[in-house]
Image: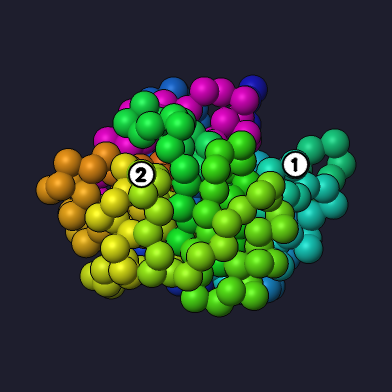
Amino acid sequence: MVEPLRLAVLGDPIAHSRSPVIHMAAMRHLGIDGSYEARLAGSPELARAVAELREGSLQGANITMPLKEEAAMACQTLTPEASAAGSVNTLRFRSGMVEGHSTDVMATRRAVADPRFDAGAPILILGSGGAAGAALVGAGGRVTYLAARNRNRALALARRGGPVGILSLQVPVVGAVVINATPLGMEGESLPGEVLEVASGLIDLAYGDVPTPAVTWARESGVPALDGVEFLVLQAAASFEWWTGIEAPYDVMLERARKL
């Protein structure tokens, strides 16, 4: 008898998370008996989830703020993506070890390869936090620029990737695919400067109940855009495949995410 698949997402806040309905849609579509719960979590709850992974009562966990650094320290091994990015947002237990992964990296790889975007365009990443670091690794192999308010943090982050140009946050790059790895847009903020006006595409990690101003502008201007909900589903699909070894039903997951 196959045991039900038990998955969870841990963070604080967590009530807004779309991950449970996205993953449940995938399981229902594939006929998998399982559950995915959102857990309001601090350090004690994370430790309990790690114990559940070890004992086999939990098969996988997504980690969101503010637990990503602590989750990385709880791992005995990291995937190459997580090690390069310096961040962990997904856990599982394999071969006697808690393993950490960065599906932010995997989602960025899939996003920049989307046929909507020019495969030869440079990449302009906005931000200097964990999401920007993962985007930097995921965009590896492309001409890449990193723009942030804090130049020292940007320089430290740039050491994780190949050659990277460091810019201030307001400086545009002609023809670039812009990856917004900042929270700007979640509360209706616009992106700084003229970065979108000369861009060839937009990948916006920020999302809310309505499209961000950047996504709205791009769509109205005819600039290809992949919004935060799409990116969230790319992350979810990468997690699902890493846990189960089964190809995720991306279109089903995206359709369900759009209904929220």
The image position of residue 138, as x and y in percent, is: 58, 43
- Quadrant assignment for the N terminus: top right
Amino acid type of the residue that numbered disc 2 sits on in the rendered structure: Gly
The residue stretch that appears in magenta:
236-260
Q: Which mark is residue 25?
A: none
In the rendering, at what x and y percent does residue 163 appear? Answer: 66, 49
Front residue of 143/241: it is 143
Q: Position of residue 170 (x, y in %)?
A: 38, 69
The residue positioned 60% from the left and 67% from the top of the image is 154
Name which residue type carries label 1.
Pro
Q: Which residue is mark 1?
A: 80
Rounded to the nearest angstrom, the CA distance separating label 2 from label 1 is: 30 Å
Membership of 256 in magenta stretch: yes
Name the disc covering residue 175, or none.
2
Q: Quadrant of residue 75?
A: bottom right
* Label 2 residue SS: loop
Would residue 70 appear left or right of 217 to someone viewing this image? Answer: right
Q: State left or right for residue 247 relative to residue 96.
A: left
Majority SS type along the magenta span: helix
Placement of 121 over or under 9, stated as above or below = above
Q: Is residue 41 left or right of residue 78?
A: left
Name the foreground residue: 225 vs 237: 225
